Image (cartoon, rainbow, N blue to C red):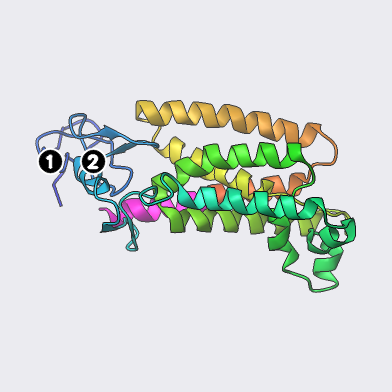
Amino acid sequence: MTQPHVSPGRQVYPACYRHPDVEMAVRSNRCGKPICADCAISASVGFQCIDCVRQAQSPGTQVRTGTGGWGRTRAGAGPMGIAPVTKILIGLNLLVFLLTLSAPDSTVLRYALVPAAVTEGGEWWRMLTSMFLHGSLLHIGFNMLALWVLGSQLEVAIGRWWYLAVFFVSGLAGSLLYVALAEPRAAAVGASGAIFGLFGAVGVLAWRRRNTPQGRSLWTNVAVLLVINVLFTFAVPGIAWQAHIGGLLAGAAFMAVYDMLRTRAAG
């Protein structure tokens, strides 16, 4: 571990891992090592060090992550290209949507999120199945566009398994808040809770890297989109705002804890 360069009278930052005489506050987004401007290479979110970029050029190589787990050097490496998990999630949602087009309403309702069915009937699986149902072409279109824009960035930034955890934790948290606060017989469908969780996660990631130009730009874009979507949530009747807010809070909290653990583990 490199020792920080001490400058009296101001905050001390760790030294670059390749240039011990250069003090720098920026860390590699993947491994967490401190890097200077000469060693920082722009990534989807924040910056990566030279070693991480070199490792990423060899698809399939495993590296130790900041939190102690193992993951691929590039989340997008492989036959499916960039962000394979995001593509699978989008494909699964589209497949379910096509299957439900010819299904009777009673069949779709059997898998929708109905608070009374969960609390009184014990059908807890509805909290998961409802995440893959959509009520219209416009509904699934907006959700899948947001899933691709946010999900692909997050998957590349933190790896596919952590990304999957954010997606499902956020979606289930949104379902849970809906069950707790919505009308008992009001049915809800959609991946919006999970997608708002991605908003929260990417927002936290960008906020914690706001000292970099790319992090600052990403934070501005995400903040604007988030404000628009939150206003839309409460302005349009019939939207399950409980799922949106539950997912948003869960995604932000998950990413804050993840990023804190990774930074601490990186030293």
Residue depicted at 24% across the width and 42% down the height: 53
Residue drawn 28% across and 49% down? 31
Q: Picture quarter containing residue 207?
A: top left
Residue under label 1: 18
**What's the CA distance linking mark 2 and mark 1?**
10 Å
Q: Mark 2 points at which residue?
A: 49
Counting labels gives: 2
Q: Height in image: 107 above or below 239?
A: below
Kind of residue sitting beneath label 2: Cys
Q: How crowded is mark 1: few (under 14 residues within 10 Å), some or many (20 or more)?
A: some
From the top left corner, tell me how far across and down residue 199 is, in percent: 57, 41
Give above or below for 114 relative to 5: below
Residue 185 in view of the camera: no
Q: Residues within 10 Å of mark 2 (few under 14, many from 20)?
A: many
Let me know if residue 62 is in the magenta part: no
Q: Are marks 2 and 1 in contact (CB under 8 Å)?
A: yes
* Image-based side of 146 in relation to 4, left or right: right
> What is the x, y in percent for residue 88?
54, 53
Residue 107 visible, this angle? yes
- Give the residue at x 41% y 45%: 81
Task: Give the x, y percent position of residue 224.
Answer: 58, 27
Helix, strand or loop at disc 1?
Answer: loop
Q: Find residue 171 and report its horizontal and vertical position in percent.
A: 64, 54
Kind of residue sitting beneath label 1: Arg
Mark 2 or 1: the one toward you: 2
Which residue occupies the foreground of this view, 102 or 235?
A: 102
The boundaries of the magenta stretch are: 253-267
| Mark closest to the chain's N terminus, 2 or 1 | 1
Is 15 displayed left or right of 27 in the figure? left
Is residue 77 or residue 163 the one in the foreground?
77
The answer to whether residue 235 is left or right of residue 151 is right
